[in-house]
Image (spheres, rainbow, N blue to C red):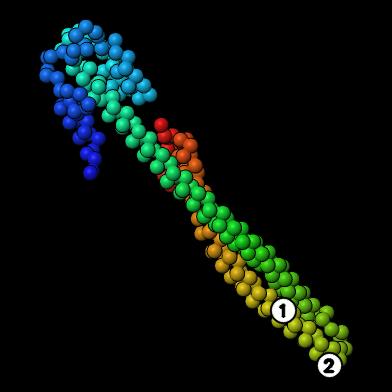
Amino acid sequence: MLQKPLTQRLSERMYQGSFGGAVSMPGVPLPELETARISSFPTIREASVGVPETILSRLCKLQPESPQLQAQLAEMVAQLAPLLAEAEQLAQEIEQENRKFLEAQHREVRKQGRKQQATCEQLRQEFNNAELSLRNVAVEQENATSHVRALSLMEQQNRHVGRWATDNELSEWQERVSKAKTRVIEANQAAVEALQLRNDAQARLEPAEKELARLGAEETRLRKTIAGEAYVDVETGLSVPARA
């Protein structure tokens, strides 16, 4: 059988007196209250032990003068105490279930974080290698260009061959210049390729690191939520207070 909602059961018991005892007519004091005040029943006060400040704790502090109100107060306390205890138990069950759910999420996020961290480390190494390769190619490109410039300057100053150079010497010079120019072309092409490889590695690394940062923020949120600590929401920049 489906159980009625707590609020409905509370309402019914408050107005019907269905909580394990007979219904008292308004204005008719209960037998056990004819000679005693509410404060003389420790069992009623014990029912609220461990319950936060609620209407029940407020009622237990009251000491009405009239027997009629004493009877109504005792009946209300008798009805509320078990329901509040039941509500407290339900709250604890919900909190335990929520904690298990958060712990499962935390476990999964840590697992994803370990995998993502390994991915980032591999991609970062690939980026570093590509960056180093690009720098080496840039040095070769600069050296090749400087060599061609030096040869061109020598030719302009007529220092490239002797004044009475032979055909073979002139041919060797032309071959030397040609090789130097080819070296520049190859260095330029290598630089283009190295730059593309570096950019590709960076394009893979950046989203991977963003995902790792997202997982890190989520791990922090879950860890602090489980511990009941405050944390800062990275998306809004606002501080989320600790749970009670």
Marks 1 and 2 close (CB-CB < 8 Å): no
Residue type of the residue flagged with mark 1: Arg
Residue at (46%, 39%) from the top-left corner?
226
User: Which mark sits nearer the N-terminus, 1 or 2?
Assistant: 2
Mark 1 vs mark 2, CA separation in Å: 24 Å
| The quarter of the displayed image where residue 238 is located | top left
Q: Is 134 above or below relative to 111? A: below
- Number of numbered discs overlaid on the protein picture: 2
- Mark 2: which amino acid? Asp
Q: Give the left or right position of residue 209, taking residue 190 as reference.
A: left
Q: Position of residue 201 (x, y in %)?
A: 58, 65
The answer to whether one can see residue 57 in this image is: yes
| 37 versus 231 height, above or below | above
Badge 2 crowding class, 10 Å Cα cut-off, few under 14, some 14 to 19, many 20 or more, is few
For residue 69, which quarter of the picture?
top left
Relative height, residue 73 to residue 109 (above, below):
above
Quadrant in which the C terminus appears: top left
Residue 122 percent location from the top left of the image: 61, 61
Q: Residue 229 at what x, y percent from top left? A: 47, 35
Would you name the residue on which mark 1 appears? Answer: 183
User: From the viewer's perspective, is 208 left or right of 146?
Assistant: left
Q: Secondary structure at mark 1?
A: helix
Where is residue 157? Give x, y as percent: 80, 78
User: Any mark on residue 167, and which?
Assistant: 2
- Label 1, residues with CA under 10 Å away: few <14, some 14-19, many ≥20: some
> Is 114 left, or right, of 78 in this rendering?
right
Task: Give above or below for 106 relative to 161.
Answer: above
